[in-house]
Image (cartoon, helix red, strand yellow):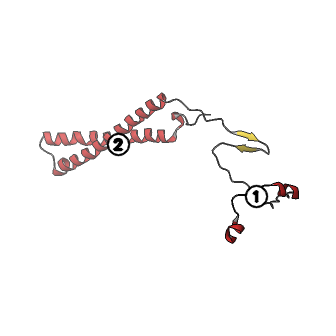
Amino acid sequence: MPVRPSLIRSIPFWILVVGSLAVTVAGAAIVFGTLPGMIAGLTDQTATTAQVYGGQSWIVVGAALLGAGVIGLVAVLALAVVSSLLRVVEAPQSAAIVADDELVVPGVYVAAPESSLVEEPVVAPVADDAAVAAAPESPVPNEETAHTR
Protein backbone atom coordinates (compact mmCIF):
# COMPACT_ATOMS: atom_id res chain seq x y z
CA MET A 1 0.00 0.00 0.00
CA PRO A 2 1.63 3.34 -1.03
CA VAL A 3 2.15 5.90 1.72
CA ARG A 4 1.81 8.98 -0.49
CA PRO A 5 -0.92 9.41 -3.10
CA SER A 6 -0.25 9.99 -6.77
CA LEU A 7 0.35 13.62 -7.74
CA ILE A 8 -2.41 13.42 -10.34
CA ARG A 9 -4.95 12.62 -7.59
CA SER A 10 -3.68 15.32 -5.22
CA ILE A 11 -6.22 18.10 -4.68
CA PRO A 12 -3.67 20.70 -3.42
CA PHE A 13 -1.60 20.10 -6.57
CA TRP A 14 -4.59 20.90 -8.81
CA ILE A 15 -5.49 23.93 -6.72
CA LEU A 16 -1.94 25.21 -7.29
CA VAL A 17 -2.19 24.54 -11.04
CA VAL A 18 -5.58 26.21 -11.50
CA GLY A 19 -4.72 29.13 -9.21
CA SER A 20 -1.42 29.79 -10.96
CA LEU A 21 -3.06 29.70 -14.39
CA ALA A 22 -5.85 32.03 -13.25
CA VAL A 23 -3.46 34.57 -11.74
CA THR A 24 -1.21 34.44 -14.83
CA VAL A 25 -4.14 35.04 -17.20
CA ALA A 26 -5.53 37.86 -15.02
CA GLY A 27 -2.15 39.60 -14.84
CA ALA A 28 -1.58 39.26 -18.59
CA ALA A 29 -5.06 40.63 -19.32
CA ILE A 30 -4.47 43.68 -17.14
CA VAL A 31 -1.02 44.40 -18.59
CA PHE A 32 -1.84 43.81 -22.26
CA GLY A 33 -5.22 45.54 -21.95
CA THR A 34 -3.84 48.75 -20.42
CA LEU A 35 -0.49 49.06 -22.18
CA PRO A 36 -1.68 49.64 -25.80
CA GLY A 37 -4.06 52.46 -24.78
CA MET A 38 -1.37 54.18 -22.75
CA ILE A 39 1.21 53.84 -25.53
CA ALA A 40 -1.22 55.23 -28.12
CA GLY A 41 -2.13 58.23 -25.92
CA LEU A 42 1.51 59.04 -25.19
CA THR A 43 2.58 58.65 -28.83
CA ASP A 44 0.00 61.04 -30.29
CA GLN A 45 0.19 63.33 -27.22
CA THR A 46 -3.50 63.07 -26.39
CA ALA A 47 -3.09 61.06 -23.19
CA THR A 48 -4.90 62.32 -20.12
CA THR A 49 -3.48 62.36 -16.63
CA ALA A 50 -5.73 59.44 -15.67
CA GLN A 51 -4.43 57.37 -18.60
CA VAL A 52 -0.78 58.05 -17.81
CA TYR A 53 -0.74 57.77 -14.01
CA GLY A 54 -3.62 55.32 -13.64
CA GLY A 55 -2.28 53.20 -16.50
CA GLN A 56 1.12 52.94 -14.85
CA SER A 57 -0.46 51.73 -11.60
CA TRP A 58 -2.59 49.13 -13.39
CA ILE A 59 0.41 47.86 -15.33
CA VAL A 60 2.40 47.46 -12.09
CA VAL A 61 -0.49 45.50 -10.50
CA GLY A 62 -0.88 43.36 -13.63
CA ALA A 63 2.87 42.70 -13.80
CA ALA A 64 2.90 41.60 -10.15
CA LEU A 65 0.03 39.19 -10.79
CA LEU A 66 1.68 37.92 -13.95
CA GLY A 67 4.96 37.32 -12.11
CA ALA A 68 3.22 35.53 -9.21
CA GLY A 69 1.37 33.29 -11.65
CA VAL A 70 4.56 32.39 -13.51
CA ILE A 71 6.29 31.58 -10.20
CA GLY A 72 3.34 29.34 -9.32
CA LEU A 73 3.62 27.51 -12.64
CA VAL A 74 7.36 27.01 -12.11
CA ALA A 75 6.56 25.61 -8.65
CA VAL A 76 4.07 23.20 -10.23
CA LEU A 77 6.70 21.99 -12.70
CA ALA A 78 9.31 21.63 -9.96
CA LEU A 79 6.86 19.69 -7.80
CA ALA A 80 6.05 17.37 -10.69
CA VAL A 81 9.75 16.73 -11.37
CA VAL A 82 10.56 16.05 -7.71
CA SER A 83 7.52 13.80 -7.38
CA SER A 84 8.58 11.75 -10.38
CA LEU A 85 12.10 11.32 -9.00
CA LEU A 86 10.96 10.07 -5.59
CA ARG A 87 9.97 6.45 -5.31
CA VAL A 88 6.83 5.32 -3.52
CA VAL A 89 7.56 3.87 -0.10
CA GLU A 90 5.53 0.85 0.90
CA ALA A 91 3.86 0.89 4.31
CA PRO A 92 5.54 -1.43 6.83
CA GLN A 93 3.72 -4.73 7.32
CA SER A 94 4.75 -5.18 10.97
CA ALA A 95 1.28 -5.62 12.45
CA ALA A 96 0.60 -8.98 14.03
CA ILE A 97 -2.80 -10.57 14.57
CA VAL A 98 -3.21 -12.17 18.00
CA ALA A 99 -6.03 -14.02 19.70
CA ASP A 100 -9.42 -12.43 20.35
CA ASP A 101 -9.33 -10.46 17.09
CA GLU A 102 -6.88 -7.89 18.45
CA LEU A 103 -4.42 -6.13 16.19
CA VAL A 104 -1.03 -5.46 17.78
CA VAL A 105 1.17 -2.87 16.05
CA PRO A 106 4.65 -2.31 17.47
CA GLY A 107 5.14 1.22 18.78
CA VAL A 108 1.41 2.00 18.94
CA TYR A 109 -0.24 2.31 22.34
CA VAL A 110 -3.86 1.32 22.57
CA ALA A 111 -5.69 1.77 25.85
CA ALA A 112 -7.01 -1.38 27.44
CA PRO A 113 -10.76 -1.69 27.94
CA GLU A 114 -11.98 -0.59 31.35
CA SER A 115 -13.03 -4.11 32.29
CA SER A 116 -9.39 -5.23 32.21
CA LEU A 117 -8.32 -2.36 34.48
CA VAL A 118 -10.07 -3.86 37.53
CA GLU A 119 -7.44 -5.04 39.95
CA GLU A 120 -7.73 -8.57 41.23
CA PRO A 121 -6.62 -9.34 44.79
CA VAL A 122 -3.07 -10.61 45.02
CA VAL A 123 -2.71 -13.78 47.10
CA ALA A 124 0.81 -14.42 48.38
CA PRO A 125 1.91 -18.04 48.53
CA VAL A 126 2.13 -19.44 52.03
CA ALA A 127 5.52 -20.89 52.87
CA ASP A 128 5.72 -23.94 55.04
CA ASP A 129 7.44 -23.72 58.43
CA ALA A 130 10.38 -25.92 57.39
CA ALA A 131 11.31 -23.59 54.50
CA VAL A 132 11.15 -20.54 56.74
CA ALA A 133 13.33 -22.17 59.39
CA ALA A 134 15.93 -23.27 56.81
CA ALA A 135 16.24 -19.82 55.22
CA PRO A 136 19.32 -17.87 56.37
CA GLU A 137 18.78 -14.62 58.19
CA SER A 138 19.02 -11.57 55.96
CA PRO A 139 22.14 -9.42 56.56
CA VAL A 140 20.14 -6.30 55.71
CA PRO A 141 17.87 -5.30 58.57
CA ASN A 142 14.27 -4.66 57.74
CA GLU A 143 12.39 -1.56 58.87
CA GLU A 144 11.21 -3.04 62.15
CA THR A 145 14.67 -4.11 63.31
CA ALA A 146 16.38 -0.96 62.01
CA HIS A 147 14.44 1.26 64.40
CA THR A 148 14.96 -0.96 67.42
CA ARG A 149 18.78 -1.04 67.29
Q: Depth-wise, is mark 1 or mark 2 nearer the camera?
A: 1
* Left or right of residue 45, residue 140 in this image: right
Between the residue at mark 1 and the residue at mark 2, the CA separation in whole angstroms equals 93 Å
* Percent coordinates x, y for residue 21 in the rendering: 40, 38
Q: Amino acid at mark 1?
A: Glu
* Percent coordinates x, y for residue 88 in the rendering: 55, 31
User: Who is closer to the viewer here, 4 or 92?
Assistant: 92
* Percent coordinates x, y for residue 43 in the rendering: 13, 39
Q: Say which element carries label 2.
A: helix
Rendered image: mark on residue 137 = 1
User: Who is closer to the viewer here, 128 or 32?
Assistant: 128
* Left or right of residue 104, residue 79 in this image: left
Question: Dot 1 surroundings within 10 Å: few (below 14), some, or many (20 or more)?
Answer: few
Residue sticking out furthest to the left: 45
* Left or right of residue 28, residue 141 in this image: right
Rendered image: mark on residue 26 = 2
Q: Quadrant of the C terminus?
A: bottom right
Dividing the picture into quarters, in which one does residue 115 lie? bottom right
- Residue 147, above or below 95: below
Q: Residue at x 56, y 32 (%)?
A: 89
- Residue 131, above or below 145: above
* Percent coordinates x, y for residue 127 in the rendering: 85, 57
* Left or right of residue 43, residue 142 in this image: right
Q: Amino acid at mark 2?
A: Ala
